[in-house]
Amino acid sequence: MIEAIGLTKRYGAKTAVYNLSFQVRPGVVTGFLGPNGSGKSTTMRMILGLDRPTAGSVTIGGHPFPQLPNAPRQVGALLDAKAVHGGRSARNHLLSLAQLAGIPARRVDEVLGVVGLQEVARQRSKGFSLGMGQRLGIAAALLGDPQVLLFDEPVNGLDPEGILWVRNLMRKLASEGRTVFVSSHLMSEMALTADHLIVIGRGQLLADMPVREFIAANSAGFARVRTPEGEPEQREKLTTALTEAGGQVLSEPDGALRVAGLPLPRISDLAHGADVRLWELSPHQASLEEAYMRLTQGAVDYRSTDDRLAHLQAPPQPGQPGYGQPPQPVIPEVPQQGWYAPPPPGQNPYASPQPSDTPKDVR
């Protein structure tokens, strides 16, 4: 088990992690989520003893990483798939790691088989693709057959078959009673892989709960309702009836309505009472991505903006797409927040204002 207590890391005037406490338990896949710059990589480096905490502590099995006897046999990690000498073959890279940890050479061939690199085992790693490098990094993490495993963005560069393989590998490792801690920005993959989530923002803990509880706590179910196309009066009549009944109604980009606060039978009765025909009435549960975006939207440091120099681009030349055609109209941007599922009743416990002494400049 991994346990962090009051973990804090400052780099000069900047605070990367602040008073972070959590546990990563064996037997489940724990997802580690947060926006860019939220402190995920710094936290994982402190777990592995690569960075020293400014305050607090983090232990693995009750011991700090530097005090673990023969740590590679107890903890495996993939933090940077590029941390390989390009002149070495995949097999020699793993063999050198095995010799340092007293691991038999036969284990090298075993993990090469597990990650599917047998055919390129004697090729220099500098010629590997990003996906092959990820597989080599995973092989290095598995080399000591450890009980604790940490992976930072393990599916980067992998094709769909590779992503499925990593997902099944994580779940298999957890089913064997191992502690599996995975950081990723792919919400769809985390929804299929993780059992438990730890979410941080600006270096602080935002959530620590099972995936289903996280989605339920940061979103609400809704109904998708569609009226006949070409009859806007039907849509307006239904919107009025639903609003008067206490429902929250939002318009979807395709013309459907997203209704929260009313059960499906009540929506059907209201439509019948208003003499409105329905083409669609279906229940929907918010995705992990929607719940995550709602929780962390206030903790995002890097936001994209419109390109103010786009008008300086050269016009299309003869023979190029768009030549001789009038410029396309600018479609006004729809505020993204309006398309999230409405929050559940009551205040979000993770959206409360931060205390005044909380550092504001974090990474």
Image (cartoon, grey):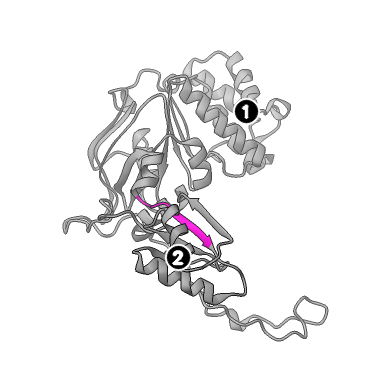
**Magenta-drawn stretch contains 219:** yes
Q: Looking at the image, which is closer to me, 3 or 267?
A: 267
User: How far apart, in angstroms, are the residues tagged by discs 1 and 2?
Assistant: 60 Å
Q: Looking at the image, which is closer to me, 125 or 199?
A: 199
Which residue corresponds to the image point at 49% horizontal and 15% vertical from the top-left?
A: 102
Q: In terms of sequence position, does the residue under pointer 1 or pointer 2 come before the other?
A: 1
Q: Residue 202 location, x and y as percent?
A: 32, 53
Q: Mark on residue 115?
A: 1
Q: Residue 249 location, x and y as percent?
A: 42, 66
In the rendered image, is residue 186 in sight?
Answer: no
Which segment is the magenta one? 218-225
Q: Residue 128 location, x and y as percent?
A: 67, 39
- How dense is the environment of label 2, judged by Cα within 10 Å: few (below 14), some, or many (20 and up)? few
Q: Looking at the image, which is closer to me, 183 or 75?
A: 183
Q: Residue 339 location, x and y as percent?
A: 46, 63
**Magenta-drawn stretch contains 149:** no
In the rendered image, is residue 15 in sight?
Answer: yes
| Quadrant containing the C terminus in the rendered view | bottom left
Q: Is residue 350 above or below residue 48?
A: below
Q: How many marks?
A: 2
Which residue corresponds to the image point at 65% horizontal and 41% vertical from the top-left?
A: 160
Q: Secondary structure at mark 1?
A: helix
Which residue corresponds to the image point at 57% horizontal and 27% vertical from the top-left?
A: 139
Q: Secondary structure at mark 2?
A: helix
Tell me which amino acid carries mark 1.
Val
Which circle, 1 or 2, is nearer the viewer?
A: 2
Q: Which residue is mark 2?
A: 273
Q: Quadrant of residue 300?
A: bottom left
Q: Is residue 19 above or below residue 272?
A: above
Q: Quadrant of residue 6?
A: top left
**Left or right of 145 in this view: 93:** right
